[in-house]
Each structure stands twice: as structure tokens, then as C-alpha cells.
Image: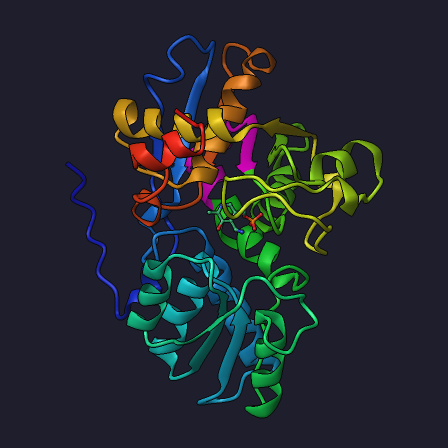
Amino acid sequence: MNTEKRVFNNIVDAIGNTPLVKLNSITKDFPCAVYAKVEYFNPGNSIKDRIALNLIEDAERSGKLKPGGTIVECTSGNTGMGLALVALTRGYKCVFTLADKMSKEKIDILRAMGAEVHVCPTDVEPEDPRSYYSVAARIAKERDGWNPDQYNNLCNREAHYKSTGPELWAQTEGKITHYIASTGTGGTLVGTGMYLKEKNPNVQIMGVDPDGSILKHWFDTGEIKPELARVYAVEGMGEDFIPENYDRKYIDHIETIQDKESLQMCRRLAKEEGLFCGSSAGAAVQGLVQMKDKFKEGDVVVVILHDHGSRYVGKIYNDDWMKEKGFL
Ligand code: PMP
């Protein structure tokens, strides 16, 4: 039993310093040790708490976010939860716009954390005044709000350069050889990669990308092809454009995964390792398994588990949904 005293002045101070947990069953035929960085131990149950804090602190310093100010973002997920958490401890208001395809639970969670949530129609063009982009832009203007823009704001990757990277270096006592993460905005992959490569340029930085995203093609060829984008089921990862947080020089490889294998891997993580995670964690571990031949004895591999399974009980962990989608 871990008896370390974790006593904090407020919930935001509990962000970070998440555990590194050895995988034992899924990786039993691997030649090396594999550890999972279990990011659902953050207070908002995901790695995005780290960036929410850094985005807000940077905006405070630069004066973009004033005392009592309003944060306006179109988000449904983990970044919204992190922003709401930090905002409520510092007296900011949060307004989130969401598409109506999002689950009721996600809306209720954000409202429970004090955010004002506007649900907008999914089936309209981004330029339509009713779309969640347009509504967010209108509200930001009306209320002199601040939009964090996690895609192009480099404070996103900086959060990982300052926290996730140093934690992994310390937790592995500088022995980490491979770092694997599902990638969306690029913050988790590139920010941590920048720190690890500064410490040891040989550490391999490996992204995991869903079939249907354009990131893998861009990384391999340098071409940006939005027309290659297709719909996929894993959440929070993959893109149909290249956010500014990316920088190819800190990435060594991108592995493509499929929905079915990734979602089934979530179930294995829960049943075999006791790690109850979201779909991007299953995807990252599926990527890890596909890349097994790249590892040798003595390597120390770390894989990021981005968020908790509770937000996906009606999907990944529901047999009816899995069967209906053809994932079982
Ligand atoms: N998984 C989940 C569940 C996420 O919310 C995100 C953030 N979009 C990612 C993976 C990808 O992380 P990043 O945006 O830092 O690349």
C-alpha cells in the first residue's frame, strides 16, 4: 500500500505526478518492461488537466484572461473538464459549446463543474450561425471572453515539456527508451518528446493514429491531405488538419491502429490489468502490441493512458453498442 501523503491546498495542486504502472499480462511475451502512465489519476480524470492549468496560467500572465474573466471553448471532453476545474478554483467563468451528438453525461459533467453549456446542432456547416464554432465565437465576442485554442496554442505542448516529460524521466530513472502516445493536438506526444529528446536524443517518440486521420500520412510524406480523413470511433485522437503543436523533428514513428482492435484492447486492459480506460488508451496499447518487434531486452517502454473508462461505459464497455457497431 502506498502511504505517501498527498495533501493539497486545493484540487488543482493535485494535477500531475500520476503513477507509472507496469503492464504484466498484455505484455507478457515482450522482451522488455512496459509501463503505463495512468493519467486518469488526475483530478479531472485525464491528462488534459495538465494543459488546462498551463493554458490558463499563461493567459493570466499575458493579461488575456483577467480576474473574473470568461473562458469560451468549443469542447465536449477532457480539456473542458480540466478548464472547468481550474476555472472554478480561480473565479473564472467557463462557457462551452457542444454539438448535440455528444452524450448527455458529458454535458451534465461540465454543468456539474459550474460551466455554462450551449448545445448546438451537429448537422450544420461550421459557418452556420447555429454551429458550435459560430456560437462560441459569438459568445467570446459578446462577453470579451478568452479562447484557449488548444490546437495552436503552444502552451499545450509546453505543459507536457514541463510536467509529463520530467515525471517520466524521474520515474524511469533516466532509463526510458521508447515513449508511446495516442495523438490528437500533438501536445502529449511532442511536448513530452521535446523534453525526453533533450535528455537523451535516442529515446524513440512514437505516436498512435487512427485509420481515418491524416496525421500518419503527413508524418511519413510531409503532405497535408484533408481529403484522406474518414470517420472513426476512437475518441480524442487523430485529426483532419495539422495543429501547430506538431513538430516532425521530435517524432520518430507513427503507427496506425483500427477501431475494433483498439476498443477490444480497452476491455483487455480492464480485465487483465485492472486499468479502466478510454478508447485512446486502448488504441495506444494496441499500437504498442503492433510495434512489439521494435523492442529488445533491456528497453524501458512507456505508454500513455489518457483518460478514464467511466466516460465510455455506454460505448466500449456496453455489449449492445459494441455489437451494433461490429466491434465484438
Ligand atoms: N486521448 C484523449 C482521450 C484525449 O482527450 C486527447 C486530447 N485530444 C488525446 C488522446 C490526444 O492528446 P493530444 O491532444 O495531447 O495529442
User: Where is residue 23 shown, x and y percent of the image?
Assistant: 36, 23
Q: Name the one closer to the observer, 282 or 138.
A: 138
Q: Is residue 328 magenta?
A: no
User: Where is residue 271 shown, x and y percent of the image?
Assistant: 26, 25
Whether 188 is drawn above or below 177: the answer is below
User: Can the viewer see residue 51 in this picture?
Assistant: yes
Q: Residue at x 67, y 65 (%)?
A: 125
Q: Quadrant of the N terminus?
A: top left
User: Can the viewer see residue 302 in this picture?
Assistant: no
Q: Quadrant of the C terminus?
A: top left
Q: Residue at x 49, y 47 (%)?
A: 164
Q: Name the one closer to the observer, 259 or 37.
A: 259
Whether 229 is drawn above or below 150: the answer is above
Q: Residue at x 26, y 70 (%)?
A: 9
Q: How many marks?
A: 0
Q: Residue at x 39, y 41 (%)?
A: 278
- The answer to whether residue 282 is left or right of residue 311 is right
User: Where is residue 113 shown, x and y percent of the image?
Assistant: 32, 71
Rendered image quadrant of residue 253: top right
Rendered image quadrant of residue 291: top right
Whether 108 is drawn above or below 242: the answer is below
Whether 23 is drawn above or below 18: the answer is above
- The answer to whether residue 244 is left or right of residue 299 is right
Snapshot colouring: rainbow
The magenta region covers: 167-181
Q: Is residue 178 magenta?
A: yes
User: Where is residue 85 shown, x and y percent of the image?
Assistant: 36, 69
- The answer to whether residue 221 is left or right of residue 265 is right
- The answer to whether residue 27 is left or right of residue 221 is left
